[in-house]
Image (cartoon, rainbow, N blue to C red):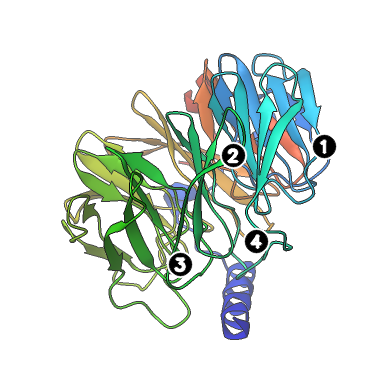
Amino acid sequence: MNKTLASLALISLTLALGRPTCAEAAPGDSITAHVVWKFQTGGEVNSAPVIADGVLYCGSMNAAFFALDAETGAVKWKFTGALFPVSSKAAVHGDVVCLVSGNTLFGLDRRTGAERWRYSARNYRPVYLMDLTDYHRSSPYIDGDIAFFGDDWGDLNGVDTRTGALAFQYTTGSSRPIRSTPVVNAGVVYFGDWEGAVYAVSIADRKPLWTHTLANCRAYYGAIVSEFVVQDGVLYFGSQHDLFAPLDIATGKEVWRYVDPNKTYLPATPLVRNGNVIIASTIFTNSVICLSRGSVVWSFKGSGIFFTKPAVSDSVLAINSTSFGQTGYLYLLDADSGKLINTVAVERATPSAPAIDGGKLYLGSGDGCIYALNLRELVAPHAGPP
């Protein structure tokens, strides 16, 4: 782990001294030029906003969690019962909101924010900063009435959202941290761990159907850190590896693969759209890449590193970069061609993924604010650099 930290410290220095730039990625304006409202949480925001029925739910690194009116930014309620930062995104199910803080899953009353229950995986302090880009905890994924999430000890837990009781648990052989967000499909839960292993486990009998280890991982790298996505029998996920290889959900075998020639990392959550998959990279390439079965359809080179899931509205793709607390950029791209629509500077960028709803784009920031931005303004022709 020390070698990992040293290596990533070098990466951090490299980015700080000279982040990759290119003409099409030059900043056009600032996030502050498009604000509909902003809300100060009191701590850096790494969590991605979630919008449900006109309410925005989001956590902060100061361990607070908020429900805001998505139209106005007004506070509906604030939850302060968590002991550790809330860095992953929430999940909404019926009248319950679920969030992870440390290795504890909370179930809150959706209307009032009152705590209904909590489930703590183990009574130990959480392990933070496996490396310098260990930005997010495993987020809850709800299937039926069960919320699934991973913890620091290789447990994939399933908690009944009605009672907070443990309904499912599978512990991996390596017992390594699970930072990925699982997905459930046809009674099988899929997830990955910090060692680059992917698991398919039957929920009914809690037995593995298959496991798959990423090929050719470099020493100390390969951690699977994204959300898992299932589409048309194929499992997609991102990792700290230069290999992107979707798997057949029935067998765990690679369907196709893409290997970045510059030895970057591909940790962002993939977006599957119109038969293609859009991924994003960090050092050396700093790009958003659209693939069709391993072949590049288009590629956009930005500035900073991409760790977040893209958001899409019609043909507009929004994705943001970060640069270890320095200035990052929100990019608006044509999702079909990769052509740049607009670039917006975010002065203290974090790996908070954007969310789009009701004509607004929502994003958290290192200044402690959750921003609601006017989407129409963001995609309108502007007078910034080409």
C-alpha span from label 2 to label 3: 29 Å
| In the displayed structure image, the side of residue 70 where residue 181 appears, left or right | left
Circles 4, 3 touching at the beta carbon (< 8 Å): no
Q: Quadrant location of residue 97?
A: top right
Q: Amino acid at mark 4?
A: Phe
Residue assigned mark 3: 223
C-alpha span from label 2 to label 4: 38 Å
Assign a secondary structure to mark 4: loop
Mark earlier in primary sequence (1, 2): 1
Residue 165 has which mark?
2
Between circles 1 and 2, the one closer to the viewer is: 2
The percent position of residue 314, horizontal first and vertical second, equals: 35, 23
What residue is rendered at 22% in x and 46% in y?
234
The residue carrying pointer 2 sits among few (fewer than 14), some (14 to 19) or many (20 or more) residues within 10 Å by Cα, namely some
Between circles 4 and 1, the one closer to the viewer is: 1
Residue assigned mark 1: 80
C-alpha span from label 1 to label 3: 31 Å
Q: Relative to residue 244, is residue 99 depicted above or below?
A: above
Assign a secondary structure to mark 3: loop
| In the displayed structure image, the side of residue 214 where residue 345 appears, left or right | right
Q: Amino acid at mark 3?
A: Ala
Q: Amino acid at mark 1?
A: Thr
Residue 90 has which mark?
none
Residue 253 shows up from this direction? yes
The percent position of residue 79, horizontal first and vertical second, equals: 78, 32
Residue 324 has which mark?
4
Mark earlier in primary sequence (2, 4): 2
